[in-house]
Image (tube, grey):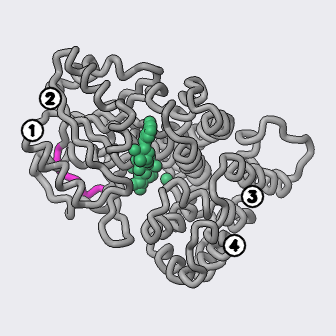
Amino acid sequence: MNSFDFSSVKQIVCEPGAVKNMAAYCTSLHIQRPLIVTDAGLVQTGIPNQVEEILTRGGIHAVQYSNIQADPAESIVFDAVAFAQEHAIDGVIGLGGGSSMDVAKLIALLTQNQQSLASMYGVNKVTANRLPLILVPTTAGTGSEVTPISIITTGETTKSGVVSPRLLPDMAILDAELTTGLPPHVTAATGIDAMVHAIEAFTSKHKKNVYSDMLAKQALTLLSQNILAVVEHGDNVTARSNMLLGALLAGQAFANAPVAAVHALAYPLGGNYHIPHGLSNALVLPAVLKFNAEHAKNQYAELLPCVKKHVPQGLSKTQQCINFISTIDNLVSEVGLPRSLAAMDIPHGDLPKLASEAMEQTRLLVNNPRTVTQADALAIYQHAF
Ligand SMILES: NC(=O)c1ccc[n+]([C@@H]2O[C@H](COP(=O)([O-])OP(=O)(O)OC[C@H]3O[C@@H](n4cnc5c(N)ncnc54)[C@H](O)[C@@H]3O)[C@@H](O)[C@H]2O)c1
Ligand SMILES: [Fe+2]
């Protein structure tokens, strides 16, 4: 058995309608003047205003910052911190997808004026204390509500991560009623992202452990059995709740057993063409699974019963592995996502540049069950083309 060091969020509430108790959650953390961090898309659903009204009725005066954009840039973080300081907030509520939650985590640290953002990038570089922090995901994808990670766009096409246990919030709230209006294509892409977190945690080369395995299997079961239901019937609260829980469990798994080549090859797609994170993952997923098959055969075989209810008896490990990969491949088609880099209008001539950029993701590539060379990365992109 691998030695391990497992940590996660202290309090998790999973209940449809849970945000109705937001004033009590704030009070329990001594928050009187929270900043709600969200984006314009979510503002259109009316959810941030509902949360603000709930807080006002409970005697808590909140302010909203709703300028978060997908794959948030550093400039957004600085703007949000200036806004937070202007309003003398004493706690942060991240309400939205990974983009809003990732910025919320950094606001809670940076408003204290104890450390610069530049000195926080990397692993365990944070020394600043943070304000009380509550995270409320409205996509079932990144699992950011339980990861010690914040991903920020730092260059034209590059992202950097702050990784520190201080980014784990005080509380994560899963309220499926907030996710019923998530459009089908976002539901599909974010759901596949969560499935990739579970799969890559389960095959993670160095830090895979008994907890992350357990979480990854349960996550993959919940996600694969509910993703079609939520894409086809967005208002199915039970299926939405299962997806939120699956994404959270996958987040806990990969926070402790990190993701690998699917994410490493997906990042250049997001950076160069602004393809959403979940969709970038979906585009390279089947090709990476096939590339890994020989080296992760037993692990993929072990995951087959999670994604397929009725597994025929007597299959060899190789057959189970092939069956797992084709089941995932079919699922990506069934949820209606684009299936190739060509379909995304990515020029074929860009593939060598993408392969070279993917090789820079050493933090992720070391976790892959099979070593990935630049020639391998190029072959995977060609396969995904
Ligand atoms: N911190 C982590 O551990 C971690 C892990 C993976 C990815 N990420 C980061 O997370 C970001 C991606 O997050 P995401 O995939 O959740 O997408 P997102 O936060 O960018 O949101 C995508 C879109 O969905 C809309 N939306 C969200 N909830 C909605 C709802 N309930 N109803 C209607 N519309 C809604 C938003 O307005 C937005 O337009 C990227 O920046 C990625 O790098 C972070
Ligand atoms: Fe991801």
Tell me the element at label 2: loop
Q: Residue at x 66, y 40 (%)?
A: 224
Residue 89 location in percent, x, y? 13, 35
Q: Which residue is mark 1?
A: 87
Q: Amino acid at mark 1?
A: His
352, 289: nearer the viewer = 352
Q: Which residue is mark 4?
A: 383
Q: Amino acid at mark 2?
A: Arg
Q: Which residue is mark 3?
A: 297
Q: Residue at x 46, y 21 (%)?
A: 15
- Region rendered in magenta: 124-129
Q: Earlier in the sequence, mark 2 or mark 3?
A: 2
Crowdedness near tag 1: few (<14), some (14–19) or many (≥20) residues, C-alpha within 10 Å: some
Residue 266 location in percent, x, y? 52, 64
In the rendered image, is residue 5 in sight?
no
Q: Amino acid at mark 3?
A: Lys
* Residue 126 within the magenta-colored segment of the rendering: yes
Marks 1 and 3, how far apart in space?
54 Å
Q: Which residue is mark 2?
A: 33
Q: Amino acid at mark 4?
A: His
User: Given contact means CB atoms under 8 Å apart, are the residues at marks 2 and 3 in contact?
Assistant: no
Marks 3 and 4, how far apart in space?
20 Å
Tell me the element at label 3: helix
Tell me the element at label 1: loop
Main secondary structure type of the part rendered in magenta: loop
Tell me the element at label 4: helix
